[in-house]
Image: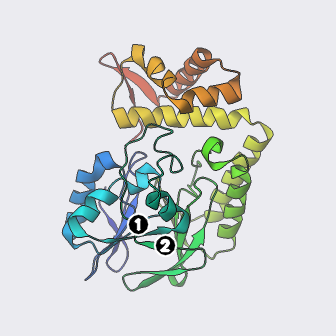
Amino acid sequence: MQPTEILKDLFFFQRGYLNANHFAWRGPDPVLIDTGYLGGVVETEQLLRTIGIAPAAIGMIVNTHTHCDHIGGNHYFQEKSDCRITLHTIGKYFMDMRDDWSPWWRYFHQQAEFFNATTAIENGDVIAVGPYEFNVLHTPGHAADGIVLYHKPEGILISSDTLWENDMAVANLRIEGSSALFRMQASLDKLARLDVRMVYPGHGAPFTDMGAAIDRANTRIERFLSHPRKVGEDLLKKIIVYTLMMRKSVDPDRLFDDLMKTRWFTETVDHYFEGAHALQYQKVLQKLTQRGIVRVENDRLVTTVSP
């Protein structure tokens, strides 16, 4: 998809669900907001070049949180440009401590690289993206270090994974803690107080009706709180699809055995489904297949979700 100029020289790049969306300001000291997944870094570089930004010219990267689909290109671009990298204090701490557990990388067997986090920001700070000032709001729940960026003059919200239009980011209570759903609600309440005309999410297309998206997210959270097993079902579906996106295709006879070697799969099934690993795997795969999200091509399992 072609980049969209949302403010003069500030571009939005819509990717898929393996590579998070990102933004780039084209100017004397270029700024990149989120860098996508490590496996997509060459395409990210090509996209930047379409608007005239060479990787060596990047002056600053801003990250909305440290999950692998948002920071995957950080190390690559920082090596080329020696750029500053700005993120929430908690995310900077993860990187300073070389903690690959808290940002989920090790837990979900994800591909990511540490980088030099140079600047920490907090809730209430204002950050300059070229000539544009964005208010920083800390929005934990999905990620401990999650932030959104709000440009009040134009009513633009970069909502990252705090708010999507028709779905919500995975709730990982194992890492984020048992109160994560309540923190998600509190973060949505923060957004509801803003005057927003256009939302640019971390995944998916931009949208205008923030109130309706918040209502949908809150309805889902209430359902999760009332029926905790649905948290486990949602996590299993999303991370299995994400695993297929990362690996591109998988031998159907090996996927279950591979998942059984991971901590996330066994712990999720143990916690929510009394350890019925094979049964839950078959149920999830059946649902994903029925919905056309997963299918067999050339004797390999693949997902139809755009990476």
Q: Quadrant of residue 225?
A: top right
Q: Quadrant of residue 193?
A: bottom right
Q: Nearer the viewer, residue 156 or 176?
A: 176
Instruction: Name the colour scheme.
Output: rainbow
* Residue 52 appears in the picture as rendered: no
Instruction: Kindly give the residue lying farthest to the top in the view shown.
Output: 253
Please provide percent x and percent y for residue 53: 22, 70
Q: What kind of element bears circle 1?
A: loop
Q: 194 above or below 97?
A: below
Please provide percent x and percent y for residue 138: 60, 68
Q: Residue at x 39, y 48 (%)?
A: 16
Q: 27 above or below 78?
A: below
Label 1: which residue? 117
Please provide percent x and percent y for residue 59: 29, 75
Q: Residue at x 57, y 15 (%)?
A: 278
Q: Quadrant of the C terminus?
A: top left
- Dot 2, crowdedness within 10 Å: few (<14), some or many (≥20)? some
Left or right relative to 223: residue 49: left
Badge 1 vs badge 2, beta-carbon distance below 8 Å: yes
State how far apart marks 1 and 2 are (Cα): 8 Å
Q: What kind of element bears circle 2?
A: strand
Q: Amino acid at mark 1?
A: Ala
Label 2: which residue? 120
Q: Quadrant of the N terminus?
A: bottom left
Instruction: Kindly give the residue lying farthest to the right in the view shown.
Output: 226
* Residue 176 appears in the picture as rendered: yes
Left or right relative to 175: residue 65: left
Q: Amino acid at mark 2?
A: Ala
